[in-house]
Image (spheres, rainbow, N blue to C red):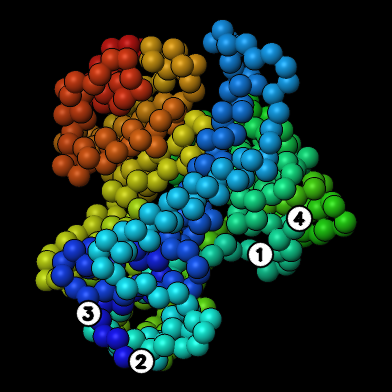
Amino acid sequence: MNQYDVAIIGSGPGGYVAAIRCAQLGMKTAIIEKYTTLGGTCLNVGCIPSKALLDSSHHYEDAVKHFEEHGIEIPGEIKVNLEQMIARKQGVVDQTTKGIEFLMGKNKIDVYHGIGSFKDATHVIIAKEDGEETIEAKNIIIATGSKPSSLPFIEIDKERVITSTEALKLKEVPKHLIVIGGGVIGLELGQVYKRLGADVTVVEYMDRIIPGMDGALSKELTKVMKKQKVKFNLSHKVKSVERKGDEVIVKADDKKGNEVTITGDYCLVSVGRKPYTDGLNAEAAGVKLDDRGRVEVNEHLQTNVSNIYAIGDVVKGAMLAHKAEEEGTMVAELLAGQKPHIDYNLIPGVVYTWPEVAAVGKTEEQLKEEGVEYKTGQFPMRALGRARASMDIDGFVKILADKNTDEVLGIHMIGARCADLIAEGVTAMEFRASAEDISRMSHAHPTFAEAVKEAALAATDDRALHV
């Protein structure tokens, strides 16, 4: 029987990063993955493939709608080759997952392909195609991730009524895509197919899209996506989804209780994700799950069984790849006797639509609820020379700072390249910067990042220079 210092069940961003860090710290490490490729949901059917399709569809939209304004004329008809687009996406995925294989080899991490389940607190049974194998580990990290959620009355047939997994490999552009759920996944994939020619209707139970983010971001993204001809049915409670041949009929009640019927040829169910522990046999190790199926952990991500830890989507908190990575690193360093920490308030959230949406820290709604006195500085992207040069004028940057100390409490932005710009906000808040600190930093001109400086100036005695 092979013996290890650490065995990790699951090879997504949390699992493979934990494995690398454990190996770097001198631990003999094994990683177990039930699929034939490493990388988990994020690399195979999540973050990476969706960004590939978002980029491809964005290029197409620019060619069709915006190139002429830039003085670029393309004679003849511009067409979508969806098969090639999906193939390119898969190529990006394959290259990325092979990169993880390389990193496992480089760091001398043993990789097992099969379903990992607990025999007891120190032994994992790996069910492989050619039989079972058992390994022993002093410490075990559960990193089994999550899977798409649904509603109890919806039958996902994976053909017309689909999840994000199927939406990444459609063989045709829908005529009318109905998206149930106005969160990150639904909006991103909805925008992909809207760009490619589909009618898109988003049905959301709450009274706004991206409900977990600052209300100002939700309002601006709704306005921009309506301008892009995406339809929104907010405050609608879906009560049935029925497929009839190539049609999907969605019935929902609006906020007044009136029944609304929406008919399309595809329905994407994107109502969130749920922790995945199927086949883990956690009870054999004595590991407790909570009432939502998540693995219970303490502040050190340690389960009730002292040598077993859990990270990522399978534990409480935001289901984000970069959160899982931080947790994987943290557990590895704890096992090595170090004292790492994670400030969960400073884990950024991003929506990769165009314009992009990004945020870190407290929302305005949270500060009001907590009774914190704060001040606001906001700057519109359209006031930037760089934004006008590239025709990306939608959006703004908003900074929330403590009214008395000027410490930055939250940064919320929507606009071009905000997924990258938010790192400045995370850095500033990690070092407990004030709005004035940011306002005094030189930002290159012309850039989108200048909006961050200007918003900080606006929060500092309303001193914005260019608006």
Mark 3 nearby-residue class (10 Å; few <14, some 14–19, many ≥20): some
Q: Does residue 155 appear in the picture of this structure? A: yes
Circle 1 SS class:
loop
Q: Secondary structure at mark 4?
A: loop
Q: Is residue 83 left or right of residue 341?
A: right
**Residue lying at 56% horizontally and 28% vertically, measured from the top left:** 59
Q: Which residue is mark 1?
A: 151
Q: Is residue 68 above or below residue 379?
A: above
Which amino acid, mark 4?
Arg
Please tell me whether residue 375 is drawn above or below residue 205 in the rendered image.
above
Quadrant of the rendered image containing residue 155: bottom right
Crowding at label 2, few (<14), some or many (≥20) Cα neighbours within 10 Å?
some
- Asked if disc 3 and disc 4 are in contact, CB closer than 8 Å, the reply is no
* C-alpha span from label 1 to label 4: 16 Å
Q: Any mark on residue 160, and which?
A: 4
Do callouts 3 and 1 mark residues in contact (Cβ within 8 Å)?
no
Give the amino acid at mark 1: Leu
Instruction: Using the image as rendered, state which of residue 238 and residue 376 is in the foreground.
Output: 238
Viewer-nearest residue: 114 or 338: 114
Given this view, does label 2 or label 3 mark the residue nearer the observer? 3
- On the image, the x and y values in percent for residue 96 come to 43, 51
- Mark 1 or mark 2, whichever is nearer to me: 2
